[in-house]
């Protein structure tokens, strides 16, 4: 899908609750692949800090990239 959007050379934004912790892109291979795919298509994440914080964890599952 990102290839199609890029081929049309239009501005686009990807967003959603993807249920993948983007903060674990270094330690979790599938998240690393996802983030790598975003970067390779020119998308940069807007949310760089945790979106869900509890007493025992902090995750970033909300996602916006442009």
Image: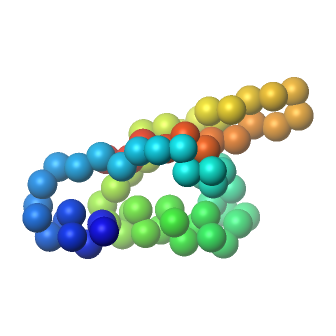
Vertical order, 66 against 5 (above or below) = above
Vertical order, 35 against 12 (above or below) = below
Horizontal relation, residue 38 to residue 49: left or right: left
Q: Residue at x 11, y 64 (%)?
A: 8
Q: Residue furthest right?
A: 56
Q: Residue at x 74, y 29 (%)?
A: 53
Vertical order, 6 against 63 (above or below) = below
Q: Residue at x 75, y 37 (%)?
A: 58
Q: Position of residue 49 (x, y in %)?
A: 59, 35
Q: Position of residue 41 (x, y in %)?
A: 31, 66
Horizontal relation, residue 10 to residue 16: left or right: left
Which quadrant would the N terminus be assigned to in this image? bottom left
Q: Quadrant of residue 6?
A: bottom left
Horizontal relation, residue 3 to residue 27: left or right: left
Q: Residue at x 21, y 63 (%)?
A: 5
Vertical order, 29 against 47 (above or below) = below
Look at the image and name its color scheme: rainbow
The one nearer the camera, 29 or 4, is: 4
The one nearer the camera, 29 or 19, is: 19
Q: How many marks?
A: 0
Q: Quadrant of residue 15?
A: top left
Q: Position of residue 27 (x, y in %)?
A: 73, 64
Q: Position of residue 30 (x, y in %)?
A: 62, 70
Horizontal relation, residue 36 to residue 28: left or right: left
């Amino acid at each position: 899908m990102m290839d199609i959007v890029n081929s049309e050379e239009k501005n686009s934004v990807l967003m959603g609750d993807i249920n993948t912790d983007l903060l674990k892109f270094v330690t979790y291979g599938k998240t690393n692949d996802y983030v790598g795919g975003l970067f390779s298509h020119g998308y940069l994440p807007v949310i760089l800090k945790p979106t869900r914080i509890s007493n025992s964890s902090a995750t970033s599952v909300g996602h916006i990239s442009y």
